[in-house]
Amino acid sequence: MPAAALILFYLLIALAPLALAAGRGRPPRPVMDEIASGMAMVAFAILLMEFVLSGRFRSISGRVGLDVTMRFHQLLARTALVLALAHPFLYTLPFARPLPFDPTRQLTLTFAAEGLVTGVLAFVLLPGFVILSIARDRIGWRYETWRLAHGLGALAIAVLVLIHARHAGRYSADPQLAGLWAVLTAAAVLSLAHVYLLKPLLARRRPWEVTGLRQLAERTWEVVLSPRGHEGISYRAGQFAWIRIGAPVFSLRENPFSIASAPGEGKDLRFVIKELGDFTATLSGIPLGTRAHVDGPHGNLVLEGRQGSGIAFIAGGVGIAPMLSLLRQLEIDGDPRPTVLVYGNRHAGQIACTEDLARMRRQHRTEVVQVLSEPPQGWEGERGMVDAALIARLFTEARHRDWLYVLCGPAPMMEGVEEALLDLGVAPRQIISERFQHD
Ligand SMILES: Cc1cc2nc3c(=O)[nH]c(=O)nc-3n(C[C@H](O)[C@H](O)[C@H](O)COP(=O)(O)OP(=O)(O)OC[C@H]3O[C@@H](n4cnc5c(N)ncnc54)[C@H](O)[C@@H]3O)c2cc1C
């Protein structure tokens, strides 16, 4: 299913409660009441679908990319928050007691304890939960602690909203809508089970082992994992995997890394990892033979299905990792198209994988453009940042218009490069990128 179909499918599900409610043919209420109920129902559908979006389903993130999936997740969380917070203020019939002309309470808001208490709790918890997610990097929690709180918090809010909808909602107890909530709740619970139960269980049956570890550059390491007792994974160049090294299979200590080796190189997986936080800082001390687990492949920073008379790879720092995989696979396949690798770093000590770069130049005739913002004396490469000016200078010719551009690096670099390429007349579909930011 292409990405557009996935988005359409998502919209259909998010709006399905409106169609089901409209189909009930209930007596009309003031329009603002209907809008309020509609907003609440769409917010709930979005909330339940958030679990599916973060459920690591390859059929979703493999098509639109994990970073796009997670940005969609964030945007929709904010949308659901606005809808949920606004809806109680739109009701025009806040009658706690039945109206004399409405004995069946078709027109009246109910304030039964279950509906009221759960609604108020969810109303208070939801904004706190979204703010905690937006401010994650500033609150100083360990990533794993935040992730656990995020999962449990989302589940608690979903349960509260489900009870609230059943007891206070005008339509949610109707069989069709109740059926929809049951299906979406089941999808949410299964998504959690997929990540936290099924994937660890499968991973336990397919263990890996650390068979290589060496320093490539300042605070940058190469880690090699080899499958033990199985054939490894089947992946496409440019994809990534979640890996756990030396941690129990059910622990939350797993991190996503691009696979830097190419499928054509064999079963071992190579990763190029930069020290950043608590897990990556321990890399240097990992003994060979340590047990590891791999969940992958994921992501769609891949060349399959994409056109381009040449390919430019534009990397900043450890963004070089997926480029190594893509370039190596092109080399193995003997792909005749011209390739350029633009690789930016701050200083020379940060340049990783110099042997790979030399081999690419020699064997695949890849033009390697090294860029340093703090170059040493006598530096022969480019000076400064990987920015619009450099891109405009490197890719000026008409033949570059229909090249494919693959971007990976710090967000400001990727945004600047993307803008520069669009200004040069490169079509958006010719630019693919991946952010090393999961949520
Ligand atoms: C698709 C993708 C591919 C990546 N490829 C590479 C790569 O090839 N090489 C490389 O050096 N880095 C890569 N990263 C970044 C890498 O995942 C983080 O640097 C690493 O997880 C940091 O872990 P830590 O425990 O050392 O640091 P922490 O201090 O725990 O985390 C620092 C930040 O890393 C991210 N992070 C940490 N743990 C996780 C997790 N379990 N899931 C998602 N995000 C997490 C969070 O944004 C967090 O704020 C990639 C990230 C993504 C999303």
Image: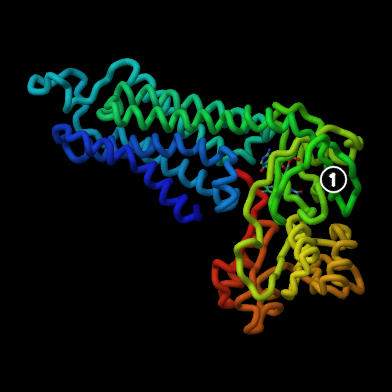
> Could you say which quadrant of the image residue 381 lies in?
bottom right
> Could you say which quadrant of the image residue 384 lies in?
bottom right
Q: Residue furthest top?
A: 113
Q: Classify residue 182 as left or right of residue 57.
A: left
Q: Quadrant of ligand 1?
A: top right
- Give the SS element for disc 1: strand
Which residue bears the numbered disc 1? 223
Q: Position of residue 404 (x, y in %)?
A: 64, 70
Q: Position of residue 99 (x, y in %)?
A: 12, 21
Q: Classify residue 233 as left or right of residue 108.
A: right
Residue at the spot x=33%, y=35% of the render? Answer: 40
Residue at the spot x=80%, y=71% of the render? Answer: 368
Nearest to the observer: residue 384 or residue 264: 264
Q: Residues within 10 Å of mark 1 (few under 14, many from 20)?
A: many
Q: Position of residue 72 (x, y in %)?
A: 50, 48
**Vertical placement of 72 versus 44: above or below?**
below
> Could you say which quadrant of the image residue 39 lies in?
top left
Can residue 344 be seen by looking at this rendering? no
Q: Classify residue 351 as left or right of residue 27.
A: right
Nearest to the observer: residue 369 or residue 400: 400
The amino acid type of the residue labelled 1 equals Val
**Vertical placement of 82 versus 428: above or below?**
above
